[in-house]
Amino acid sequence: MTPDKHTAFRRPFMVAEISGNHQGSLDKALEIVRAAADSGADAVKLQTYTADTITLDVDKPEFFVGGDHKLWGARRLHDLSEEAHTPWEWHKPVFELANELGLVAFSSPFDETAVDFLEELDAPLYKIASLEIVDIPLIRHVAQTGKPIIMSMGAATIGEVADAVAAAREAGCEDLTLLVCTSSYPASAADAHVSRIPAVAATFGVKVGYSDHAPGVGVSAAAVALGATVIEKHLTIRRSDGSVDAEFSLEPHEFEALVDACRDAAVAIGSPSAWSSPSEAESKRLRPSLWVTRAVRAGDPVTHENVRSVRPSGGLPPAEIDNVLGHVFAEDADAGTPLTWALLR
């Protein structure tokens, strides 16, 4: 199922990322799925890996997150992955509930065994995570499924993106969406650079979305205004629960606001050729024009005292005031009579 099939006025495809917000509880994972549906999301996404498939169980310094990382400083990659991973046996109930609620369910695989597992679940599309954009063999394996691919660009150079796009296409991917992303957790709005969206679309000839790790909803709405067709954002039940992703996740009421803001932004784009909307008809009727402001008799001269520009329309345009001054009335007229040339001589 391709994201752009969920469009109305280029409506963005809204993805709620569960990631590690389940905190090791299937019940909480299912609660997040229900919250996603209630919030108006189009899809929920998991991450499919184990600590042993995504990294190694070693204590070398290279296998620790940098000490100055905002959220996960000095944590061992294996320990962090063990805490955040979604057990593979949970995928089926999560997918089934999502589908029952009208959501698309899919995942980010982190190795070829994850892809093969997700194929058994008939995953409708795949996400390549930002850091895996350099894993060309993984990208090829995913592309060979023939399913649509959403590929995140966080931390990548334009050359790395070009290599990943080429690998996906050469392996058979015909439906590719790139996600502009800042791989910082949490990210700042100043680092979003959503103006990359139209540039990426033009450079690679693909649909482009945005994977948002910044607080609030403003960055995503701006991304949609610049052409994003997919928005991905982490969803948690309560940030105060303190999951590994909590700080850059939205609570359900905030995710609902995100959906509303992004869909409003998509509708608001409209057309650059639009000047006056049919919805403005009443406002247009109420624009000022020239009216008789006090009772006059035939032969009276037109003056500033008996003709003025007031709301609504119906009389001559206000710009005609200099042209009507000096004329005389051809007939009697009460206050509240629209001034027309037929009324003058």
Image (spheres, helix red, strand yellow):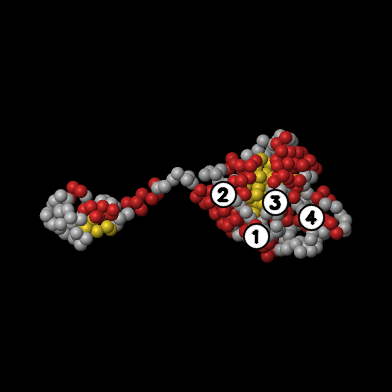
Front of the two marks 2 and 4: 2
- The local crowd at label 3, few if under 14, some if 14 to 19, many if 20 or more residues have their Cα within 10 Å, is many
Amino acid type indicated by mark 4: Ser
Amino acid type indicated by mark 2: Leu
Please report whichever mark, 3 or 2, sits nearer to the chain's N-terminal start: 3
* SS at mark 1 in the image: loop
Q: Are marks 3 and 2 in contact (CB under 8 Å)?
A: no
Could you say which disc has been placed on residue 188 in the image?
Answer: 1
Amino acid type indicated by mark 1: Ser
* SS at mark 4 in the image: helix
Which residue does the numbered mark 2 point to in the structure image?
A: 226
* SS at mark 2 in the image: loop
Q: Are marks 4 and 3 in contact (CB under 8 Å)?
A: no
Which residue does the numbered mark 3 point to in the structure image?
A: 154
Cα distance in 3D space between marks 3 and 2: 18 Å
Please report whichever mark, 1 or 4, sits nearer to the chain's N-terminal start: 4
* Residue 100 in view of the camera: no
Please report whichever mark, 1 or 2, sits nearer to the chain's N-terminal start: 1
Which residue does the numbered mark 4 point to in the structure image?
A: 81
Amino acid type indicated by mark 3: Gly
Q: Is residue 258 above or below residue 102?
A: below
Front of the two marks 4 and 3: 3
